[in-house]
Image: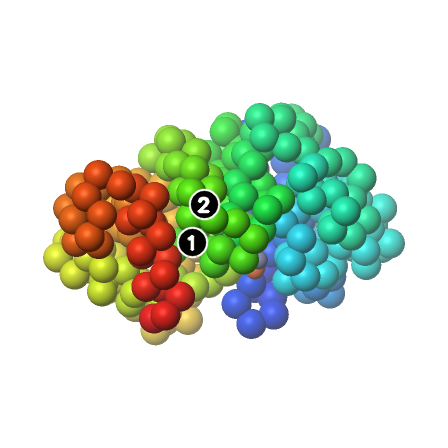
């Protein structure tokens, strides 16, 4: 049975996700920036938190760790490569590890770039990817602690997941990302159409997350740095890393 997934808006534009594995009753909170709205969602559903699941150390993803652990005794799972910066970490996981979550399992990918220890969790059976601040819908995270080469390699791992994979990212940045993407690929018909759908969703006060990997492959310029037309447009034919770097730089200055 697939995971039940509840999205909890937090802070300005963060998303925390509550996951429940129905067979075992395991409940996880992905990247709890703050504890209060997570505890409120748990009590309104009658769910008991068993895991906190972190993608990276930034406070807007881990700020609720210790309060949640104190209130629920949840086990905190996070990146092995960043153990020292994850508050309260109990279980450290890294590239290729399988993290058992009740009767489901997530494959862990090391995806450095935004931070050096960033990881992503792929729940194959539920076709769900928790990408933190590595992959946003139509965007990617800023390179605070990594190089374009690292981030391109990281995104390339995620790009290979099945197109039906749903992408649950750490922030509602989709509308601004679409605006930038249109400056990179103004003639991409899939992008133009998706940007319209996103504008309509936001105008109606709705979340744009999750998206699908299929839509990301068609419209996310950061995943498309290997597309020859885009490489030529960015002045780096045949060079995906240089194309990615040029797009990232343009976005930083957008
Ligand atoms: Zn971050
Ligand atoms: Fe963040």
Q: Quadrant of residue 108?
A: top right
Q: CA distance from mark 1 to mark 2?
A: 9 Å
Q: Where on the image, by quarter, is ligand 1? A: bottom right
Residue 146 located left or right of residue 43? left
The quadrant in which residue 253 appears is: bottom left
- Residue drawn at x 40%, y 32% as measured from the top left: 161
Up/down of 131 relative to 12, above or below: above
* Residue 162 visible in rendering: yes
Crowding near the residue tagged with mark 2, few <14, some 14–19, many ≥20 C-alpha atoms within 10 Å:
many
Q: Which quadrant of the structure image shows residue 155? A: top left
Quadrant of the snapshot with the N terminus:
top right
Q: Which mark is residue 140?
A: 1
Select label 1 or label 2 by which is in front: 2
Give percent across and percent down for residue 231: 21, 47
Across and down, in percent, residue 94 comes to 63, 32
**Of 150 and 52, which appears nearest the observer?**
150
x, y percentage for residue 249?
36, 61
The quadrant of the picture occupied by the C terminus is: bottom left
The residue nearer to you, when weighing 171 against 50, is 171
Residue bearing the label numbered 2: 151
Q: Are marks 1 and 2 in contact (CB under 8 Å)?
A: yes
Residue at (27%, 60%) from the top-left corner? 181
Residue 197 in view: no
Q: What secondary structure is found at the residue carrying circle 2?
A: helix
In the rendered image, residue 109, in percent from the top left (x then y), is placed at 54, 34
């Amino acid at each position: 049975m697939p995971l039940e997934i509840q999205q909890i808006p937090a802070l300005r534009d963060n998303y925390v996700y509550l996951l429940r594995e129905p067979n075992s009753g395991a409940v996880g909170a992905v990247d709890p920036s703050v504890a209060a709205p997570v505890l409120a969602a748990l009590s309104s559903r009658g769910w008991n938190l068993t895991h906190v699941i972190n993608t990276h150390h930034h406070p807007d993803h881990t700020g609720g760790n210790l309060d949640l652990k104190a209130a629920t005794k949840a086990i905190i799972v996070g990146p092995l490569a960043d153990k020292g910066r994850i508050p309260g970490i109990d279980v450290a996981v890294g590239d290729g590890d399988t993290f058992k979550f009740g009767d489901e399992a997530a494959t862990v990918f090391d995806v450095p770039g935004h931070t050096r220890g960033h990881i992503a969790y792929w729940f194959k059976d539920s076709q769900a990817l928790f990408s933190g601040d590595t992959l946003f819908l139509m965007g990617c995270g800023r390179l605070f602690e990594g190089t374009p080469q690292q981030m391109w390699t990281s995104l390339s791992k995620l790009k290979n997941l099945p197109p039906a994979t749903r992408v649950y990212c750490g922030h509602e940045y989709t509308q601004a990302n679409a605006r930038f993407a249109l400056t990179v690929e103004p003639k991409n018909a899939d992008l133009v159409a998706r940007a319209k759908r996103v504008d309509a969703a936001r105008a109606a006060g709705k979340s744009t997350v999750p998206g699908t990997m299929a839509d990301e492959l068609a419209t996310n310029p950061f995943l498309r740095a290997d597309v020859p037309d885009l490489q030529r447009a960015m002045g780096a034919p045949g060079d995906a890393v240089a194309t990615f770097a040029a797009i990232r730089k343009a976005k930083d200055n957008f």
